[in-house]
Image: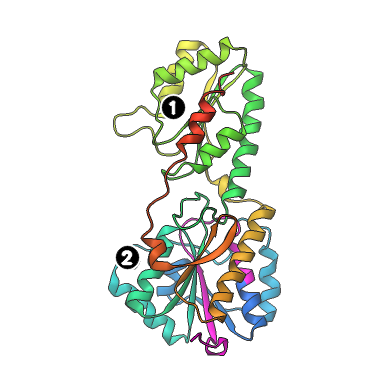
Amino acid sequence: MAKKSTKVKKIAILASGGNSPGMNNAVIALCKKTIAKKITPYVIYDGYKGLLEEKFVLIDQEKLLHIEEYNSRGNIFIGSARSLDFYKPEVKAKAGKILKNHGIDVLFAIGGDGTYKGAAGLHKYGKVNVMGLPGTIDNDISSSEQTIGFFTCLNRIVNTIDALRDSFDSHSGVCFCEVMGRGFSDLAIYAGVATDAEAIVTKDNLKTKEEFLKIANETKNNGKRSCLFVITESLYGKDGLPSLQEMAKYIEKETGRVTRVNVIGHVQRGGTTDAWDRANATLMAYKAMDCVLSGKFNRVISMIKGQIVDIDITKATNASRKKNKMNILKEHKEVCLI
């Protein structure tokens, strides 16, 4: 039998891992819905690290008016931090005691796979109820087809690459453009398709300097003024592979064309959150709170076939890792040099 909502008196919310645009909207929505349901919300600053340091802040009606100012911003106003200690079962047990001492009935954790694993361990070793929301720009959470922040980040990348294309078109140049993704390449793949990149490079689709040179020459022969490669971060400059800077020098030497590396960097994770991520984060937060109100705990919120659903957190953390979309790369490769 489902637990009555009145049994939940206090909740706490934290964010963990890298910031992701839309996290603020999820926090705000959770606070507003809990206050509407006469439940007391707390936020925990600086993720699991802040939980261990007991950085709890009560959000009342007055503070709610203040935090709504963060509705459009791509930061996470309660901060985020990684805690290596939190991998230890005894530390999760300690964190559970801290939550109980503060009277917290449910912890809402917003973040990626690592955040989910931390929450699942907190439930197992700390004996507390948890809920997870998918906040990561990488879109790499196995249990959800879409994550909070992915589309804002993708739009930021596309806008930046469009600007780079203008510049390199003007000088008939070659550009290596590195984007975030941490080994999962949805950002590179969709940005590359959206900007008509001459090559999209992922960990499953590495290219040699000779292959880059061939593409640069082919595109020029086909009448294209610029050549742009979109590359997932951290692929080159290790494991015996030359760095992007080394390959750019090689291309420039062999072709005589201006060739540069542009690392888009942390601008991808900030700025104004787009409408989709704001709405999606808000609706996911409502779904998470609806689960709690109906007595469903230890779940993560996911987007599956366009629907917002809840999944058991243990099942979500044990799901097979997403695979890169090689079919899209194959389709794009057939036309990108034309």
Image-quadrant location for residue 123: bottom left
Q: Is residue 25 magenta?
A: yes
Q: Amino acid at mark 1?
A: Gln
- Residue identifier under label 1: 245
Residue, x 50% and y 43% (percent of image)? 186
Q: Tell me if residue 61 comes above or below residue 146 in the rendering.
A: below
**CA–CA distance in space, label 1 to label 2:** 36 Å
Residue, x 61% and y 22% (percent of image)? 168
- Residue identifier under label 2: 87
Residue, x 49% and y 43% (percent of image)? 180
Q: Residues within 10 Å of mark 1 (few under 14, many from 20)?
A: some
Residue, x 56% and y 28% (percent of image)? 197
Q: Residues within 10 Å of mark 2 (few under 14, many from 20)?
A: some
Secondary structure, mark 2, is helix
Magenta residues? 1-29
* Residue 82, image x, y percentages: 41, 61
Residue 45 visible to the viewer: no
Image-quadrant location for residue 43: bottom right
Q: Earlier in the sequence, mark 1 or mark 2?
A: 2
Mark 1 against mark 2, which lies toward the viewer?
2
Residue 215 visible to the viewer: yes
